[in-house]
Image: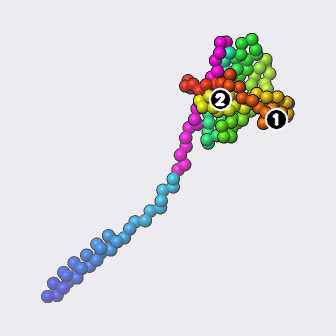
Amino acid sequence: MKTRFLVLGMIISLAACNKKAEDTQVVTEPEMEQPEITAPAKECYEYANGKDTISLSLAITNGNNVSGDLKYALFEKDGNTGTFTGMFKGDTLYADYTFQSEGMTSVREAVFLRKGDALLQGFGDITEKDNKQVFKDKKSVKFDEKMALKKIACE
């Protein structure tokens, strides 16, 4: 009889141990979510009419920061090529354009308005401020639809 009780006690003990193991949960630390790193969005634009061309390529980071290259090749005018940095505020791109023309480096303020799949360049009266050409009054800038830079496939 003692043997039976001993065997029965061992079975009950084993069952209790198995039940306890099932109830125990392993707690692990949650994995830290890594921020998604995305490549800058690249967009390219071009205006072409006869012998006049304007080429613009830009990389957009963080939704609105912009850097890129801009090249003007207007017939019978001095061309210029350079880089710019700026940001979109709504549908308007404000940038500093650093370029080479006639062997000199210059900086000027550039403004483009996004209209559909095109960018319209802003024009207005300018002045010199801190070795940079800037618009006298940003509110009076006019955007030229005749020289719209149309979105193209980037090379």
> Residue 137 bears which disc, if any?
1
- Residue under pointer 2: 119
Q: Nearer the viewer, residue 141 or 9?
A: 141
Residue occupying the point 22% across, 78% down: 11
**Residue 57 position in % (x across, y down):** 63, 27
Residue occupying the point 68% across, 25% down: 145
Asked whether residue 67 appears in the rendered view, the answer is no
Q: Residues within 10 Å of mark 1 (few under 14, many from 20)?
A: few
**Residue 101 position in % (x across, y down):** 77, 20
Kindly indicate the quadrant of the structure image that contains residue 74. Answer: top right
Kindly indicate the quadrant of the structure image that contains residue 38. Answer: top right
Kindly indicate the quadrant of the structure image that contains residue 125. Answer: top right
Residue type at the position of mark 1: Asp
Q: What's the magenta region?
A: 34-51
Q: Nearer the viewer, residue 15 or 110?
A: 110
Q: CA distance from mark 1 to mark 2?
A: 20 Å
Tell me, yes or no, whether the highlighted magenta stretch contains residue 36.
Answer: yes
Vertical side of 87 occupied by 120: above or below: above
Residue occupying the point 78% across, 24% down: 105
> Residue 91 bears which disc, if any?
none
Asked whether residue 111 appears in the rendered view, the answer is yes
